[in-house]
Image (cartoon, rainbow, N blue to C red):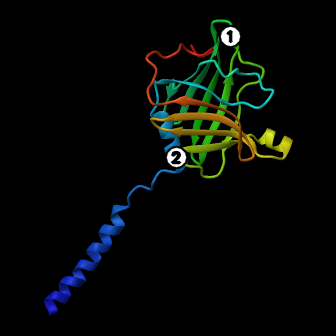
Amino acid sequence: MKKLLFASLLAIPLISCNSSGDNPEEAPAAFEEFFSALAEQCGNAYPGGLTLEPEGDEMLTGTELLIVHFRECDDDQLKMPFHIELEEEDDWDRSRTWIFTKHDDGLEIRHDHRMRDGSEDDFTMYGGFSVDEGTALRQEFKSVERTEETGIFRGWRIEIVPGERYTYGTIRGDEWSWRVDFDLTEPMDEVPPAPWGHE
């Protein structure tokens, strides 16, 4: 009986040491998982199209081909050009690049707009930081300026469902106001050329 009790007492500190010594790494935050899901597409380009556009917005017709290219990736930043087919001109608008930057406490999105000669557009590098925790599939970013101007939350909502779709859009309150979707089921055979200003 004494031998059994002694063995039991010896086992207690051993179990305690093992459980405290393992210290498994903390699970990544939702924004980190989201960033990783984007980064997994690196090097690939995918076709897409317009899903929703406010009445009176004439940026897109809804019939042109759109392409997102996960072009430049490192541990903390992704650069994703957004190419727009110009049907009537038999040409492409390669002026826009979405830039996602990972910080210690969240993500940041910026919009790099360029002229055809590569110079910066007058309206460029606008964006904002992620809000709330989000999920591994969805992150929302607040435009402080637009929100203060209207008193209603305004910004961007980005979603990615690996192997299915990538969605970029603007939001007003909880609703989409503008949205484009890209098909991630199969990458394009050829990637587009560099966006303007990023050759």
Residue toward you, 79 or 9: 79
Q: Quadrant of the N terminus?
A: bottom left
Q: Secondary structure at mark 1?
A: loop
Q: CA distance from mark 2 to mark 1?
A: 35 Å
Disc 1 target residue: 116
The reply to whether callout 2 and callout 1 are in contact (CB within 8 Å) is no
Amino acid at the residue labelled 2: Ala
Relative placement, left or right, of 191 versus 158 is left
Relative placement, left or right, of 197 versus 33 is right
Relative placement, left or right, of 148 versus 25 is right
Residue toward you, 101 or 6: 101
Q: Secondary structure at mark 2?
A: loop
Picture quadrant of residue 17: bottom left
Residue toward you, 182 or 126: 182
Amino acid at the residue labelled 1: Arg
Sequence-wise, the earlier of marks 2 and 1 is 1
Question: Which mark is on residue 62?
Answer: none
Q: Quadrant of the C terminus?
A: top right
Disc 2 target residue: 136
From this view, report whether residue 129 is shown above or below residue 116.
below
On the image, the x and y values in percent for residue 122 come to: 78, 20
From this view, report whether residue 151 is shown above or below residue 184.
below
Picture quadrant of residue 197: top right
| Furthest-bottom residue in this view | 1
- Residue at 64 percent of width and 52 percent of height: 132
On the image, the x and y values in percent for residue 106 come to: 60, 46
- Residue at 76 percent of width and 46 percent of height: 153
Picture quadrant of residue 57: top right
